[in-house]
Image (cartoon, helix red, strand yellow):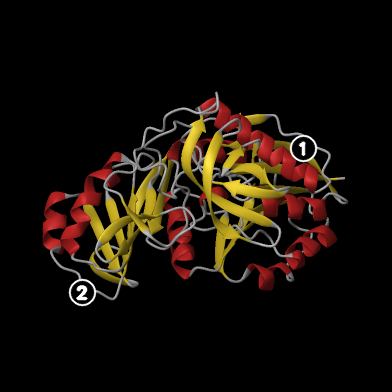
Amino acid sequence: MEIEVVKFDNLGRGIGYLDNKIIFIPKTVPGDLVKVKIIKNKKNFLIGKITEIIKPSKLRIKAICPLFNTCGGCDLMHISLSEALDYKLNKVNDILKKNKIDYKVLKIVKSKPYNYRYKITLKIQDGIIGYYESNTHQVVPCSYCYLAKEEINQIIPALKKLNILNGEVTIRVNSKGEILLIINSLDKIANISNLIHDFAIVGIIQNAKCLYGEEYFMENIESYLFKISYNSFFQVNEEICAKLFDLIKDNTLFSHNILDLYCGVGSLSIATNKEAKVLGVEIIPNAIKDANFNKKVNKRDNAEFICANTSDVINKITSQYDTIILDPPRNGVSKEVLTKIKEEKISQIIYVSCDANTLGRDLNYLLDTYEIKEFILLDMFPNTEHVESFCVLNLK
């Protein structure tokens, strides 16, 4: 059947209509006329798959990656970088509007479009290594990822030597080209010595057990030095991460007491005003160990880090804090935590988010007490539908 694509949805999919029913079609562009096969038929919507592009949109460009049409790793490689940036601005503003937030984001910070990722996770299925195909759990073989750093791409073909049949491998690399391999598989790993000889591997971890070297590496971002354990969160794009640190520093110049929730390895805490007292909270023990190391190596004795659940800690805080930093996972911040922040009337909230939908939900709840001072998008994930938001709220 033929479908004309009329717009993008908030997941980077094209939207069309079939018998007045909405149909989502990945890898399409507004203006495309395509033949599709229905792969999911739900009560309120359909999901289609391209079988033929009858007439391409004027916005469509040829994706640099030959796997783009099948691989689920990228969403927007078939439009220009400028069109993708416009899409992300429109997407976030649309989400704000749906959440009844009267604010328009105007600025997005660009990143280089390729070879920017310092971390990728590859699936392994019957010995095939790659990413899942869009809307499936079928692995598309991948020997080169255009989003990943070159050091990652160099080691991908060599992973077959490990003889893993099923599982997944996360590859993390630092700015020195040093590699951490994190393997989740019940298979017995072979030929580790070959990889160690051929690549700058500082650690291999399987099922949370260190098989070789260390469980961490060191990373330099601007003037900061960070220890990052294999299971600790850290931003995947160094260029944008540095700009995020600058935004944190600029917006905490006059802060005195800062509470950093979901602090990870302490990177945002360490990027704050050096004169401020900082308390960082994180639930992952390894991340807190890293954070305590990082405060010493960065000479931030005014910072303290504790391993705890955010919801448990929030009930003990007082209005001594004038700034709170929120950098939660994709599911956002719990209503319990947001309610406590409002009750304590903390002067400033800095909210860093990788999911505009949960950010919009949380802002909707906060904006009866707070107002938006600054809202900037950071293109942390070029060629995908994802975007990082940096939002500063002031108490009314």
Determine which residue is flagged by label 1: 373
Whole-percent x, y for residue 191 in the image: 13, 64
Provide the secondary structure element on which disc 2 rests: loop
- How many numbered tags mark residues here? 2
Residue 298, percent from left and from top: 45, 48
The x, y position of residue 53, in whole percent, is 48, 35
The residue to which callout 2 is attached is 188
Give the structural element (helix, strand or loop) at label 1: strand
Of 71 and 260, nearer the camera is 71
Front position among marks 2 and 1? 2
- Placement of 287 over or under 113, stated as above or below: below
Asked if the residue under mark 1 is in contact with the one under mark 2, i.e. CB atoms within 8 Å, the reply is no
Along the viewing direction, whichever of 291 and 196 lies nearer the viewer: 196
Q: Residue furthest top?
A: 58
Q: Is residue 51 left or right of residue 176?
A: right
Can residue 354 be seen in this snapshot? Answer: yes
Mark positioned earlier in the residue sequence (2 or 1): 2
10 Å neighbourhood of mark 2: few (<14), some, or many (≥20)? few
Badge 1 amino acid: Lys
Q: Residue at x 76, y 68 (%)?
A: 336
Q: Is residue 62 above or below residue 190?
A: above
